[in-house]
Image (spheres, grey):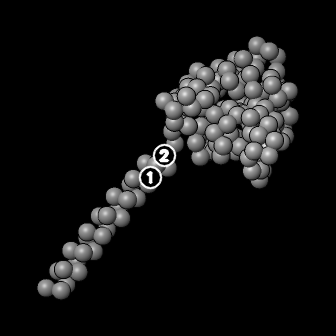
Amino acid sequence: MTTKLTQSLLVALAFLFSASASVQAQDDASRMTYAMAETAMEAAEAYAREQGWNVTILVADQHGTPVMLRRLDGASARTFDIVRSKALVVLQTGLTSGQYGAMLAAGEIEEIEGGVTFQGGVPVYVDGVLVGAVTASGVRGNQDEEISIAGATTIGSITKD
């Protein structure tokens, strides 16, 4: 009888742990779909090309995992590291990278190791939920931000509201 009770308890515990793992896996799932990333990337790239800007563009999910990356001909190799650093601050703060930089300079926010403080990275919110970021690097910060906004606003908003 003790063996059957032990087996029943083990089965019940296994079920609870698997249900908990399933919920956690859903929370860890990317909110940025490939289709969303593709739409944002196409718009961002089109905007950059219209302006004649050679940039690197990154679309990342809420975890900072790249969903899509493009380095246009003529973009510097170092722009890859910069778009990743912009995504880092955007996703940790929910702010644009420029807003983060301004708040850091004013002493209103803690520094994020490996982050950058200049414009060019924007969050993507859908129905008030942070789904990822669009970042660009290769021209002036305000121009990088224009590119990122052009992409992000095709799939959501750059503000939570």
Query: Observer-nearest residue: 73 or 103?
Result: 103
Secondary structure at badge 1 equals helix
Q: Amino acid at mark 1?
A: Ala
Q: Amino acid at mark 2?
A: Ala
Residue 13 visible in the shown view: yes
Is residue 9 placed above or below 97 in the rendered structure?
A: below
- Tell me the quarter of the picture where residue 46 sits: top right
Query: Observer-nearest residue: 31 or 109?
Result: 109
Is residue 97 placed above or below 139 in the rendered structure?
A: below
Label 1, on which residue?
25
Query: Which residue appears farthest toward the bottom when viewing the image?
Result: 2
Q: Position of residue 159 (x, y in %)?
A: 61, 29
Label 2, on which residue?
29
Give yes or no for contact between labels 1 and 2 (Cβ–Cβ under 8 Å): yes
Q: Position of residue 2 (x, y in %)?
A: 18, 86
- Tell me the quarter of the picture where residue 137 sits: top right
Quadrant where the N terminus is found in the figure: bottom left
Secondary structure at badge 2 equals loop
For image coordinates 30% across by 70% down, the residue present is: 13
Tell whether 36 sits left or right of 135. left
Q: Position of residue 59 (x, y in %)?
A: 64, 34
Is residue 29 placed above or below 17 in the rendered structure?
A: above
- Tell me the quarter of the picture where residue 15 sits: bottom left
